Image (cartoon, rainbow, N blue to C red):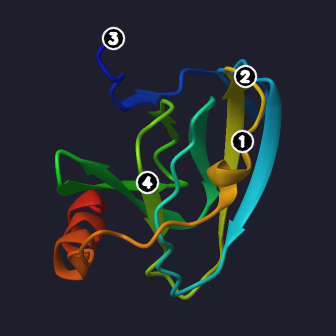
C-alpha cells in the first residue's frame, strides 16, 4: 500500500508580451470554472480518481484540508496567482469570507472514471476553526 500523496502549492511563472501577461498552462483532462458565493462555508469533498488544480482568478478563498484529524487552512487570492494541487483521497472544503463572488479555475486531472461520491459533500467530522481560517486571510494580505 502506497503513501497518500500530499497537497502542494506552486507559484505560476509568467512572461509578458506588450501589455499581456501569460501564465504557465496547467495540463488537465478537463477545466471547470467554479463560482463560490460570498459568505459560503462549504462542507468537505473527497475525490477518489481526480487531482484538483485550483487557481483563484477573481477574489479570494480559504481552502480547508483535513489531514490527520486536523484542519489546515490555505488562503488563495487573485493578486498572488498560485496553483493548489489536491491529489485524490484528501478531504477538502472552501470558505469565502468575502462580500464578493470568488471565481476559481480547476484544471482537473483524471485518474479513472468519475465517482458519483466525488461530488457529494461530506459533513466535516468536527467544526472548522473559523477564527483560525480568518487569521490566515488576514496574514495572507501582508
**CA–CA distance in space, label 4 to label 3:** 21 Å
Q: Nearer the viewer, residue 53 or 99?
A: 53
Q: Nearer the viewer, residue 13 or 36?
A: 36
Q: Where is mark 4, residue-wise?
A: 92
Residue shown at 33%/11% (left/top)?
A: 2
Q: What crowding class fits label 3: few (fewer than 14 Cα within 10 Å), some (14-19), or many (20 or more)?
A: few
- Helix, strand or loop at label 1? It is loop
Q: Residue 52 vs residue 129: left or right? A: right
Q: Which mark is residue 2?
A: 3
Residue 141, quarter of picture: bottom left
Q: Residue 80 vs residue 47: left or right? A: left
**CA–CA distance in space, label 4 to label 2:** 20 Å
Residue furthest to the top: 2
Residue 56 in picture, x, y percent from top left: 59, 52
Residue 112, quarter of picture: top right
Q: Is residue 134 placed above or below 1 in the rendered structure?
A: below
**CA–CA distance in space, label 3 to label 2:** 17 Å
Q: Nearer the viewer, residue 19 or 120?
A: 120
Q: Where is mark 2, residue-wise?
A: 112
First in sequence, mark 1 or 3: give its number: 3
Can the viewer see residue 104?
no
- Helix, strand or loop at label 3? It is loop
Q: Which mark is residue 115?
A: 1
Q: What crowding class fits label 1: few (fewer than 14 Cα within 10 Å), some (14-19), or many (20 or more)?
A: few
Q: Is residue 136 placed above or below 109 in the rendered structure?
A: below
Residues under numbered marks 4 and 3 in contact, where contact means CB atoms less than 8 Å apart = no
First in sequence, mark 4 or 3: give its number: 3
**CA–CA distance in space, label 4 to label 1:** 16 Å
Amino acid at each position: 500500500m502506497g503513501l497518500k500523496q500530499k497537497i502542494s502549492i506552486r507559484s505560476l511563472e509568467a512572461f509578458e508580451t506588450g501589455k499581456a501577461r501569460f501564465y504557465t498552462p496547467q495540463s488537465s483532462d478537463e477545466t471547470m470554472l467554479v463560482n463560490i458565493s460570498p459568505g459560503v462555508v462549504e462542507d468537505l469533498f473527497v475525490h477518489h480518481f481526480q487531482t484538483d488544480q485550483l487557481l483563484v482568478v477573481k477574489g479570494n478563498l480559504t481552502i480547508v484540508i483535513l489531514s490527520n484529524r486536523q484542519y489546515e487552512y490555505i488562503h488563495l487570492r487573485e493578486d498572488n496567482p498560485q496553483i493548489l494541487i489536491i491529489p485524490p483521497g484528501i478531504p477538502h472544503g472552501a470558505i469565502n469570507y468575502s462580500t464578493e463572488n470568488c471565481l476559481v479555475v480547476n484544471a482537473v486531472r483524471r485518474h479513472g472514471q468519475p465517482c458519483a461520491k466525488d461530488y457529494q459533500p461530506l459533513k466535516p467530522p468536527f467544526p472548522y476553526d473559523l477564527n483560525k481560517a480568518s487569521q490566515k486571510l488576514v496574514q495572507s494580505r501582508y
